[in-house]
Amino acid sequence: MKIQRGEGHIEFREVEDSKPGADEVLIEVKRACVCDKDIHILHCEFPKTRSPFILGHEFSDVVQVVEKEVKDGGAGDRVFSDDANQGDF
């Protein structure tokens, strides 16, 4: 289940996994956090952010798929992000 921002509200719904590009990995999110930045997004305080937007940019997870142009890391690696969307707000 993912949390997705609507126009002035949040809704819970399933969304399809995106397909990784040749230089990307696919990760399975194990834990995600909704922080104050997400609340500001919910209240439309960052004009560059467009709805729908999946909240929870602080997360920890496991790499599932590694595409051919990825030079470091591999499937099963544990990774985290504390600000994946920095600059997109």
Image (spheres, rainbow, N blue to C red):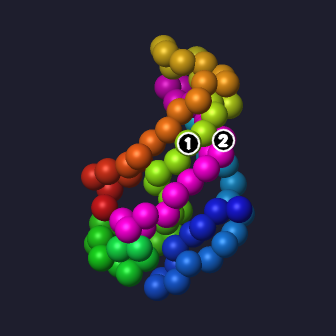
Measuring from the top left, give residue 10's x and y in whole percent: 56, 78
Residues packed near mark 2 inside 10 Å, few (<14), some (14 to 19) or many (20 plus): some
Q: Is residue 8 magenta?
A: no
Magenta residue span: 21-38
Identify the image quadrant of the N terminus.
bottom right
In primary-sequence order, the first of circles 2 and 1 is 2
From the image, tell me which residue sits under label 2: 28
Measuring from the top left, give residue 47's x and y in whole percent: 28, 72
Q: Name the residue located 60 percent from the left edge and 39 percent from the top edge.
A: 61
Residue 33 in view:
yes
In the image, residue 57 sits, relative to residue 55, either above or below, namely above
Total tally of numbered discs in the picture: 2
Q: Name the residue located 69 percent from the left edge and 54 percent from the top edge.
A: 16
Identify the image quadrant of the C terminus.
bottom left
Measuring from the top left, give residue 2's x and y in whole percent: 64, 62
User: In the displayed image of the protein, which residue is found farthest to the top?
Assistant: 71
Q: Name the residue located 52 percent from the left edge and 58 percent from the top edge.
A: 33
Q: Are marks 2 and 1 in contact (CB under 8 Å)?
A: no
Residue 41 in view:
no
Q: CA distance from mark 2 to mark 1?
A: 9 Å
Mark 2 residue element: strand
Mark 1 residue element: strand
In the image, residue 10 sits, relative to residue 18, either above or below, namely below
Measuring from the top left, give residue 43's x and y in whole percent: 38, 81
Q: Name the residue located 57 percent from the left edge and 69 percent from the top edge.
A: 4
- Judge by depth and name the residue closer to the eye, 1 or 58: 58
Q: Is residue 30 magenta?
A: yes
Q: On the rendered structure, is 24 left or right of 62?
A: left
From the image, tell me which residue sits under label 1: 60
* Amino acid beneath label 2: Glu
Picture quadrant where residue 21 is located: top right
